[in-house]
Amino acid sequence: MADRVPNWLKQRAFLTPDRPALFFEESTWTFAQLYEKSLCWAAELEREGLKAGVRVGLLIQNTPDAVCVIHALQQFGAEAVLLNHRLTAAELMWQLEDAEIAAIIYDSIYEKKVENLKGTFVRKRLSDTFVAHPFTSKEEFSLEETCSIMYTSGTTGKPKGVRQTYGNHWWSATGSAFNLGLHENDCWLCAVPIFHISGYSILMRSVLYGMPVRLYTHFDEKVINEALKRGEGTIISVVSAMLTRLVETLEGSYHQNFRCMLLGGGPAPKPLLEACAEKRIPVFQTYGMTETSSQIVTLPPEYSLTKLGSAGKPLFPCQLKIDAPPCAEGEILVKGPNVTKGYLNREEANQAAFMNGWFHTGDIGYIDEDGFLFVLDRRSDLIISGGENVYPAEIESVLLHHPAIREVGVTGVADKRWGEVPAAFIVERESVTEEELRQFCEARLAKYKCPAYFIKVNTLPRNASRKLLRRQLKAQFEHKS
């Protein structure tokens, strides 16, 4: 395949200019309008003195302006650094310095957070008004060129910037199309954050497929259910916590054109899948990560109950294997053109993750005799809370700075609403209240990372080499519950 392809949005606006690209509340944007607005923003970045190849941080929520800015960075030739607005100013600053950003574009609701960021980078509000200037967009994209960077925590708690190329996004969209097919009336509902790979990949597929996106600022199960019943979407991406809320509040059934509930964020419980089958909701379970630019393994709905707990088989352009004998448990290895080229400024991590062309996910699983993948542990200690990745080591590092704490161990425990939430097991140095610890964490961590439970214990379970046994912590919590 050629290394260079036509500028995606420019080509789409040329091919189907009047086709709807984006629905938001009561408004509609065509691909031509989306392209023109993105050029306005690209011209403004040029006027600020920025050059192609720089990195620009995006602190955004799900709005049409944010979508335009994402595309503007592609027209300009800048790398988008997607920032999680739930992070604290200190957490954001670490990522901005690591990425060496030249500018940050932010939604005005994050004004105070941005005011606390130190640095000489250009700062632009999404709501800023400016005089339009002419701008000549790129004619082509190189598939090897970095398009976006998204930070994901490692098991040490140190965030790593995942580099996603135009080729990664191209092949992710291609693999998804081979798997789900393309229908003329397709519309992808996006109620997941566009700073996550789940939401960002929907925007890329929209332009490549010529398919509209119906965008929501946040997830509201009642609003989404009504939209799907009215036939306003054919596909939606969700995590288990979202799907549970949809099923629990659904009265009646979805419109006949609804064809795919794309489920990520870990395996779904059997009762939930049975409820979906009863309501004739077509659930496609998936396995993927930021490093694979969205899904890389998918289970079609016809196998959702017979292969309960399976993530499915790899998408057509991708490969999958287990670093173990057949049907035995081992590390999940993946290969494909949608897999990241590596982490930003992390040579050691890159050497550990990539071997002989295979990406070592750090997740444990097995492949059954029929070729279906079963994921046993998400990077062993990873907590997935409402679709967000939470790493115990990061929380432990924060809590160990509290003078009253001698030791701490964090694990994920089941939660009906969020799937899992962090629970912290504390060995005290001196007496401290749960409220003090909660406030201490909230001042230093994003809210979704803060422990939901603080359990005081005399000792923490460790093995002979003094390694913390997190599974025993989970068992202790379940026993007490």
Image (cartoon, helix red, strand yellow):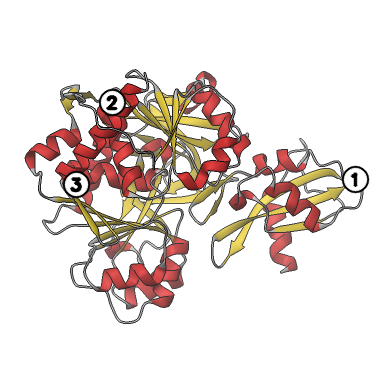
**Label drawn at residue 76:** 2
Taking the image as shown, residue 201 lies to the left or right of residue 420, namely left
Q: Residue at x 16, y 24 (%)?
A: 139
Q: Earlier in the sequence, mark 2 or mark 3?
A: 2
The residue beneath circle 3 is 178
Label 2 – label 1 distance at C-alpha: 54 Å
Taking the image as shown, residue 199 lies to the left or right of residue 401, namely left
Amino acid at dot 2: Phe
The residue beneath circle 1 is 429
Amino acid at dot 3: Phe
Per the image, label 1 sits on a secondary structure element best described as loop
Q: Nearer the viewer, mark 2 or mark 3?
A: 2
Q: Nearer the viewer, residue 86 or 137?
A: 137
Per the image, label 3 sits on a secondary structure element best described as helix
Q: For the residue carrying disc 2, how many other residues have a C-alpha within 10 Å: few (<14), some (14-19), or many (20+)?
A: many
Quarter of the figure with the C terminus: bottom right
Q: Is residue 93 above or below residue 310?
A: above
